[in-house]
Amino acid sequence: MSGASLASLTNQKIDTARRFIRQSQESDEKWLSVGLESSAIFQLRSALNGFLKELSCAYSLSGSLDVATLLLEAESKQIMVPALSELADLLSRSDSWCAQLYQAYLVQFECRSSLSVVESDNLIGRGNDAGASVDFYLAKLVELVLRFREESSEY
């Protein structure tokens, strides 16, 4: 890794996602908007992974990118990590922004889908909310990261 801090790398991913979202909302080309939203989802998931690395470093955990693994490790060390507990709770609820981000990532980049029948005109995923959901994921992730950093700076 270069001289950049984990927080700086997470910030770069968040900023890149923000730029992709803005470009997708400004684009008149539907095909380009879909690609930019997919790129934003990838960057947001990468930013979330970067945030998990930040948490791992701050609490001397293994560096896993799995929330459940990190939470179990923290519990075994008798450490309370509020951000990990919040992420675990969010991932346990399918209607949360975090679970939806994970699902969007799986659909876009691992070609997984909960649909058993594929309509012939819907072979490629399409953004249907002009980037609003991806923008929501961004806002919620930024809120979580900033809250963690603010709480960490108090100590």
Image (spheres, grey):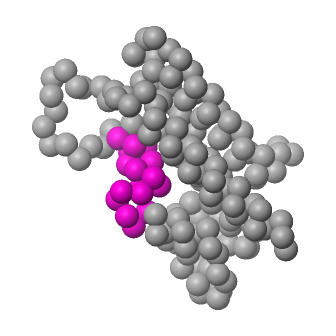
Q: Nearer the viewer, residue 33 or 39?
A: 33
Residue 110 appears in the figure: no
Please give left or right for residue 46 compared with residue 90 in the image. Answer: right
The percent position of residue 43, horizontal first and vertical second, equals 57, 39
Q: Is residue 84 above or below residue 149?
A: below
Residue 22 appears in the figure: yes
Specify start and end residues of the magenta stretch as a single range: 91-107
Please give left or right for residue 84 compared with residue 90 in the image. Answer: right
Q: Is residue 108 above or below residue 56?
A: above
Q: Is residue 26 above or below residue 10?
A: above
Q: Nearer the viewer, residue 24 or 122?
A: 24
The percent position of residue 88, horizontal first and vertical second, equals 49, 69
Q: Is residue 92 above or below residue 97?
A: below
The percent position of residue 5, horizontal first and vertical second, equals 81, 50
- What residue is at 39 percent from the left and 16 percent from the top? 30
Please give left or right for residue 41 compared with residue 99 in the image. Answer: right
> Which quarter of the rendered picture does the C terminus lie within?
bottom right
Please give left or right for residue 109 compared with residue 82 in the image. Answer: left
- What residue is at 72 percent from the left and 44 percent from the top? 11
Label the magenta part by its dominant secondary structure. helix
Does the magenta portion include 74?
no
- What residue is at 77 percent from the left and 62 percent from the top? 150
